[in-house]
Image: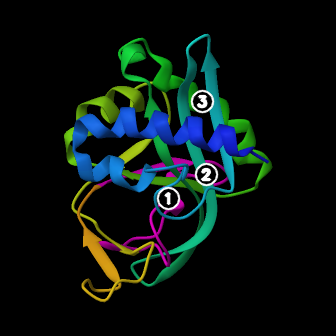
Amino acid sequence: ELELAEHVELAEFFRKTYGPTGAFNAKPFEGSQSWAGARPELRAIAYDASGVAAHMGLLRRFIKVGTTDQLVAELGLYGVRPDLEGLGIGHSIQAMLPVLRELAVPFAFGTVRPALQKHIERFGRNGPVTVVSEISVRSTLPHARTDLPPTRVEDPLVIILPVGRPISDWPAGTTIDRNGPEL
């Protein structure tokens, strides 16, 4: 439902938000593309007088946890404009909970770089978020390339948010296969 101008604005937001973490992280957002891997199904976008203030994307998919196929709402493309960091705007993810419940998914799932562990743990103190480490996550590259393998395996922090089922129902496993590109 976004117009081209809105994709351009979001792409600029992501370049400015992800660029300081490394030029490679901003590269997928060159031009007007407002997603890096899988295109989100839904977006929560916060605006203020300066434009895009924060963003969270969502995509329903089946992932494989160990040997179990698990329906999740993958959360990704998370960002807060640098001038607003530290103001608690990240807790606005709670606004996504009614949408997650409406989608009838048992869990929300996401991954972050280990460098964000303290940030995520602070967030988890205010809600039922579980942060898990030492899980390998396999993703398909968003574009087929002849110079790279078609998949990538990383060891990020895995975030699990119970939505329709308790965390005790999350399948056991030390590997997760996204069955597609990262959001």
Tell me what residue is drawn at x 46 percent, y 70 percent.
181
Residue 71 is labelled as none
- The residue beneath circle 1 is 183
- Give the left or right position of residue 93, taking residue 1 as reference: left
* Total numbered labels placed on residues in the image: 3
The mark nearer the N terminus, 2 or 1, is 2
Q: Is residue 174 magenta?
A: yes
Q: Amino acid at mark 2?
A: Leu
Going by the numbered disc 1, the residue's amino acid type is Leu
Q: Nearer the viewer, residue 75 or 38?
A: 38
Can residue 137 be seen by looking at this rendering?
yes
What is the magenta range? 157-183
What x and y, as percent, mark residue 102? 79, 47
- For marks 3 and 2 on the same chain, the one whose residue lies earlier in the sequence: 2
| In the displayed structure image, the side of residue 135 where residue 44 appears, left or right | right
Which element carries disc 2, helix, strand or loop? strand
- Disc 2 versus disc 1: distance between alpha carbons? 8 Å
- Tag shown at residue 94: 3
Q: Nearer the viewer, residue 153 or 172?
A: 153
Q: Residue furthest front?
A: 31
The residue carrying mark 2 is: 58
- Using the rendered view, name the quadrant where residue 118 is placed: top left
Residue 49 to residue 165: above or below: above
| Disc 2 residue crowd, few under 14, some 14–19, many 20+, Cα 10 Å | many
Q: Amino acid at mark 3?
A: Gln
Q: Position of residue 49 (x, y in %)?
A: 61, 10
User: What is the spatial separation of the Cα atoms under label 3 and label 2, in whole angstroms?
Assistant: 13 Å
Residue 79 placement, left or right of 44:
left
Q: Are marks 2 and 1 in contact (CB under 8 Å)?
A: yes
Q: How is the image coloured?
A: rainbow
SS label for mark 1: loop
